[in-house]
Image: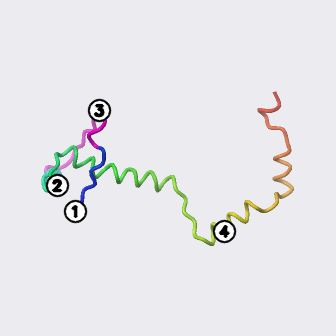
Amino acid sequence: MTVVTESIGTHKKSARIDLRMSDENREIIAQAAEINGLGLTDYMLSVALPAARADIDSARTISLSSRAFTAFLDMLDAPDSEEAAALRSGTTMWDSK
């Protein structure tokens, strides 16, 4: 297993996360950390941070197929419907004051 070691040690370490787990799970993580030449904290961070970033990126990214992207662009380029034009020409509640 290749462990991605990001800039784990470059920030001041003041926050803590306490985990409850079985002795068996702790031993597995400790063995993996030792195999990779890392302490428990650095190993867990090297595994958890990339996974957390991937989850965040996945939640913030919308992927469209080429066909769907073309349809989206066509909708953006299409003229407004009468209803949309009426909404846009009206006065907003924050403009009325």
Q: Look at mark 4 in the image and give the residue it sits on.
A: 70
SS of the residue under disc 4: helix
Tell me which numbered mark, 1 or 3, is placed earlier along the sequence: 1
Q: In the drawing, what numbered circle is on residue 12?
A: 3
| Contact flag, marks 2 and 1 (Cβ < 8 Å) | yes
Report the number of numbered marks. 4
What is the C-alpha distance between the residues marked 2 and 1? 8 Å
Q: In the drawing, what numbered circle is on residue 1?
A: 1
What is the C-alpha distance between the residues marked 2 and 3? 23 Å
Tell me which numbered mark, 2 or 1, is placed earlier along the sequence: 1
Extent of the magenta region: 8-23
Main SS of residues in magenta:
loop
What amino acid type is highlighted by mark number 4?
A: Thr
SS of the residue under disc 3: loop
Q: Look at mark 2 in the image and give the residue it sits on.
A: 36
Where does the image place residue 60, in percent across and percent down from the top left? Answer: 51, 52
Q: Is residue 69 above or below residue 16?
A: below
Tell me which numbered mark, 2 or 4, is placed earlier along the sequence: 2
| Contact flag, marks 1 and 4 (Cβ < 8 Å) | no
